[in-house]
Amino acid sequence: MRRIFSPGITLLLISAFSLPNFAQIAGPIQRRPFSGDTLGKNAVMCLIAKNMEVHGHRGIDGYPNNTVASFKAAYDAGADTAELDLMITGDDQIVTAHDPIPNIKAERCSLHGKSLEKTALRNMSSTEVAQIRCGERHFSEARTEPIPLLRDVFDAFKDSKVAGKPTRLNIEIKYFKDQVQYFPPEDQYLDLIIKEIRQSGWSQDRFFVQSFNHETLKNLKAKAPDIEVVPLIWDARGALDAATNLGSRLVTTGWPQLTPEVVFGLHQKGIRVVAWTPNTVEELKWVIASGANGVITDRADLFMKIRDELCE
């Protein structure tokens, strides 16, 4: 039998079609002629969705990005993994933030009620950064949250569980040659990250490290072979090459070019795929229908709603 779905789904399908011969036990069964509705498309979609990982992208929509409150809300909505980004302060403390200069793109942050404007986290001490407050859409919102240290995130969720299983982290690191002013030298930066991970006490199966910079991931892997590294890419059609070149059994890829054919090709090579960042009903259903192993989304709550409706 050719594997169409991920290993877990394949096993469930094999089990479903390997049941005892009930005709011998309870007499002949009156079967309807087979049609496309015999199994039901929602049943297949339900089966796939139930086996998918759900990563809360910087937490969940409705909360400030990359904050403990946002990660907690994502877990509470049913996400089993929180995706986060790493930046670094002037005194080499690792914090969870998407941008080296907050209040430019993803984060909406202020210091003592004033916009940070062009001030980079790398030009601030961790004591100063601890006083920053970020909103969801604007820094002056009624509800704001601090930028946490990575160790604070590890500590906050060390014992947390979703559906009886320990929560996980998808840790994205950034290090780009045209932005070296925002980071220490790469070798030192990776040592700091590895040290933080080692001191967290988290088991290796509870996190992985992803990045668009695959060379940085190779360098991380050389320093810490036990840490899982995952190539992050935009075009799913390059997923197989990216995973193969890095020796990874998982790839995180943009969703628009993700098709059942692409996913099937990856599964044939023993590579799992998690798609980012579908956030609408149509986009999430597209990813489910592709047979992907997981999704990184701002709307973990919406994914769960779709899954529940598919499985009614």
Image: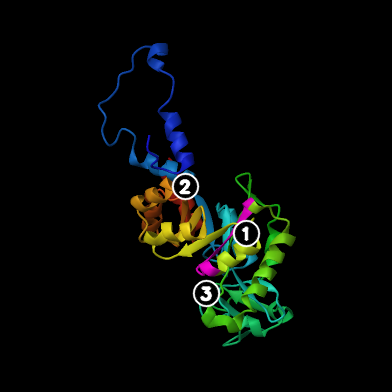
Q: At which x and y percent is residue 65?
A: 56, 69
| Labels 1 & 2 near each other (Cβ < 8 A) | no
**Residue displayed at 68% across by 52% down:** 203
| Labels 2 & 3 near each other (Cβ < 8 A) | no
Type of residue at label 2? Gly
Seen in the image, is 95 located left or right of residue 272?
right
In the image, residue 209 lies in the stretch drawn in magenta:
yes
**Would you name the residue on which mark 1 appears?**
72
**Would you name the residue on which mark 2 appears?**
270
Frontmost of labels 1 and 2 is 2
- Give neighbour class at mark 3: few <14, some 14-19, many 20+ (Cα, 10 Å): some
**Would you name the residue on which mark 3 appears?**
106
Q: At which x and y percent is residue 172?
A: 56, 66
> In the rendered image, which quarter is residue 17 located in?
top left
Type of residue at label 3? Ala
Frontmost of labels 1 and 3 is 3
**Residue displayed at 63% across by 81% down:** 121
| Labels 1 & 3 near each other (Cβ < 8 A) | no
Q: At which x and y percent is residue 52?
A: 49, 48
Q: From this view, report whether residue 24 is shown above or below residue 68.
A: above
- Give neighbour class at mark 2: few <14, some 14-19, many 20+ (Cα, 10 Å): some
Q: Secondary structure at mark 2?
A: loop
Residue 208 badge: none
Camera sees residue 214: yes
Q: How far is disc 1 from disc 3 in space, using C-alphas?
A: 19 Å
Q: Which residues are magenta?
A: 205-215
| Of pointers 1 and 3, the one earlier in the residue sequence | 1
In the image, residue 300 lies in the stretch drawn in magenta:
no
